[in-house]
Amino acid sequence: MKKTHYIILLFFPFFFINCKKESKKSSLETVEVKPFEIDTLIVKKHLYTLASDDMEGRKPGTPGIEKAAKYIETEFQRIGLKTFEGAENYRQNFHEKDLDLFNIIGVLEGKSLKDEYVIVSAHYDHLGIKEGAEVDSIYNGANDDASGVTGVLTLAEYFKNKNNNERSIVFVAFTAEEMGLVGSKYFGTQVDASKFVAGINMELIGKEPNTGPKTAWLTGFERSDFGVIIQKNLEGSGYKLFPDPYPKFNLFFRSDNASLAKLGVPSHTFSTTPIDIDKEYHQLSDEVTSLDMKVVTETIKAVALGTGSIIRGEDTPTRITDLE
């Protein structure tokens, strides 16, 4: 009897240990890694950071825009983007208007069509600090254009995780747009425009447009079939894209898309804001509290879906030839 009990006691710990190991293994095997999703949480993270008082209005040549640049660079690095054309870092440095300026550029290399580029852009500069203001002196530029840069960062992470871009995607945060499209104009002088098949610029995407919920408008709609391709891809999504409703404002030439469009690239700007009645445009009141996070989020989703066939190399927009 004693001998029998001894054998059982030896066996029991062995069985118990193995059960614990199997249980641990099974729990590890059931761990599910969720894919990246475009949602209001990631939108708030980027938007609240870029439009914070800490950025001091992101005026070129100030400590505030340097903070914004570092944030964008850190995000590009976290996401895993490469530098543009083998540069040492994400900055494209140049000197103009007596200022040391820099665009921030990250690249997601394509697969079968890696020498064809799609540019996704927005400007990260704004107006800085208003002298003599008694209470709020910072031009936070939440809608103009922290909302667009939020789109750039979110789409960079989205397409990185999607991993289906046959064409290379160049993500750019342009500087000095408010000073006359300075950053994008410089970028245009440094690239071979024939390699760029499309330009997707985002500006003022934080408010519901006059066309209603889940809609946006596109500048220069009639100048290429870029907008028609987007509309086709959005069919069935519940989201609609319309031509620019403000032709008298000549908006196609007033944002960074114009710098590449003038070189023939089908480059257009997505926007949602009803600018004819917007009270926050270029005002101290352009803060995150004036924006609709759902509008920003849904617009970024629409850009992702709408441009998908271009990113995958299935569609190529017509070039722009009429610039009058």
Image (cartoon, helix red, strand yellow):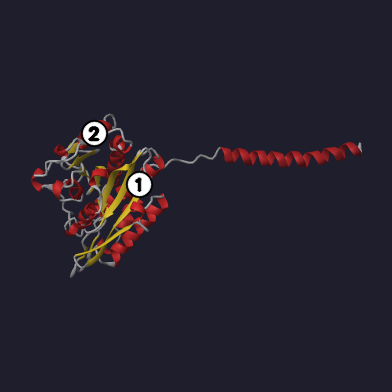
Residue topped by disc 2: 229
- Residue 111 x %, y %: 38, 39
Q: 126 or 213: which is nearer to us?
A: 126
Q: Residue at x 77, y 42 (%)?
A: 13
Can residue 70 be seen in the rendering of this structure? yes
Viewer-nearest residue: 67 or 264: 264
Q: Secondary structure at mark 1?
A: helix
Q: Quadrant of the N terminus?
A: top right
Query: How far from the left and from the top, in percent, is residue 168?
Result: 33, 43
User: What amino acid does circle 1 point to?
Assistant: Ala
Query: Does the rendering let one see residue 271?
Result: no
> Which label was assigned to residue 156?
1
Tell me if label 1 and label 2 are in contact, CB under 8 Å: no
Q: Quadrant of residue 301?
A: top left
Residue type indicated by callout 2: Ile
Q: Nearer the viewer, residue 64 or 290?
A: 64
Indicate the secondary structure of the residue bearing disc 2.
Answer: helix
Q: Quadrant of residue 197?
A: top left
Query: What residue sits 32% from the left and 55% below the top?
Result: 48
